Image: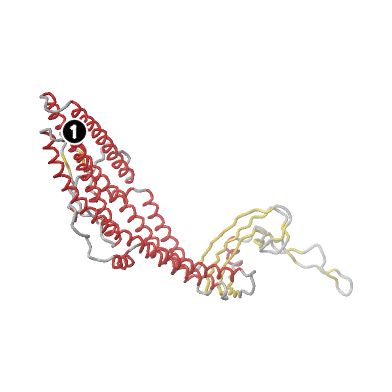
Amino acid sequence: MLMMSLVLFGAGAHAQKTWSLEECINYALEHNIQVKQSLLNVELSEASLFQSKMDLIPSLNLGATHGYNWGQTIDLYTNEFATDRTQSNNFYASSNVTVFSGFQKINTIRKNQIDLLRSKYDADQFMDDVSLNIAIAYLQVIYYREMVGIYEAQQDVTRQQVERTSKLVDAGTLARGDLLTIQAQAANEELQVTNMQNSLEISVLTLAQLLDLPDTKDFSIGSPNLMLKEELPTALSAINIYELALEKRADVKSSELAVESSIKDLDIAKGYMSPSISLGGSWGTGYSGAARQATDFSDPYLSDVAFGATANGVPVYSYTSDVTYGTKPFGEQFSDNNNQTLTAQLNIPIFNGFRTRTAIANAKIGVENAKLNLETTKLNLRKTIQQAYADAIAALKTYHSAEMKLTANEEAFLYAQEKFNVGLINSLEYNTAKKDRDNAQSEMLQAKYDFIFKAVILEFYMGNPLTLQQWQ
């Protein structure tokens, strides 16, 4: 991570906090909505992996029903017609487990493991991109702040020259036209300072918006004094940086895992061609209000109806008793109606409208597409690093050239200033020398930060922490 120290400055009784680059990046990673969404995607992948593991466990379902019946129906437990209102209860439990299905569940677990790791790399990559954008915006603020300082210093020189020229005009040494020319230059530089201050304010606002700050009114960053090195911060070549990036970059890792995930999709699709075996079991019982049993018997008495006759025709009577019936108790029915089942099921796919073969063909295409995406990611990375490396070297050369140009223009301006003060050159020639010096200052500062921008990008692709410490 970053190694920037926290910079505080006092402003009377109201001290305003300044943000370091490290604080800006840490705040963004903690509060950025898109970062939070990328982390939620990791949680979704974790949930999918957990569910695929739980799919290996046998299922278990419990149930119960309670109801009443009116009208004629066949009672489930007595197998007789019931015409009165009848209460019934059912209780059941069932379980099922897939013993074999072409290793689809195992491959699904492995795929979800890959997808979980891939989602973490995607989140890391998104956070890296956010960090890089903030670092560039942070440097942009520092650049415009230094440009404002340069423009203000140039403006001060012009103001001093206006005062000096005014005195020379009053003394009759210089023509009034020279004063008007210098005053026009001062007005132009006033506009340049205003424009650069506006650019500074916009760059600060841009950085604050990248942080998603609720209030940007008192937002301020530190003012590190960045010093330019005379060479690239790394001795590695572009190809060496690329090889290092292949090992560390999260987007490359994610693309590699995408290939592995698509291969698992192919294995899952092939699993549909395999026979599947599953086991199931169930238990059930119930209660019916139509189930009756004898609950009481009266004392025996002689029946009034003969059940037969002797050979002489004499009627024969038997003893009988009255029986009272009641609903069979719940506990007895719960036990008597108990039943269990155990089943084994074999399913052999024969023909399903070529859906399986189509799924396999699509999965193969997915594998090839993932491989091409990986190659595209590597190719884009190589091009980006080559371009960043070439840009960094070019920016460093531009800086050295701008530095030499500034040295020459500084001397030329000082010489022109001395000649103007004694009336050897006019104001137009003086302004030309000053503009050349001012432009050289701006060009050198621009080249300086252009090189720092490119060097930071190279460090980023090498997997190093985003820090400005090495430039201080």
Residue 428 quadrant: top left
Q: Residues within 10 Å of mark 1 (few under 14, many from 20)?
A: many
- 347 horizontally vs 156: left or right: right
Q: Position of residue 219 (x, y in %)?
A: 26, 40
Q: Position of residue 51 (x, y in %)?
A: 46, 63
Q: Nearer the viewer, residue 409 or 279?
A: 409
Residue 272 quadrant: bottom right
Q: Position of residue 271 (x, y in %)?
A: 54, 73
Q: Residue at x 58, y 73 (%)?
A: 342
Q: Quadrant of the N terminus?
A: bottom left
Q: Position of residue 73 (x, y in %)?
A: 72, 58
Q: Residue furthest top?
A: 170
- 98 horizontally vs 192: left or right: right
Q: How many marks?
A: 1
Specify how the rendered protein is coloured: secondary structure
Q: Residue furthest front?
A: 424
Q: Amino acid at mark 1?
A: Ser
- Residue 81 shows in the view: yes
Q: What residue does disc 1 label?
A: 427
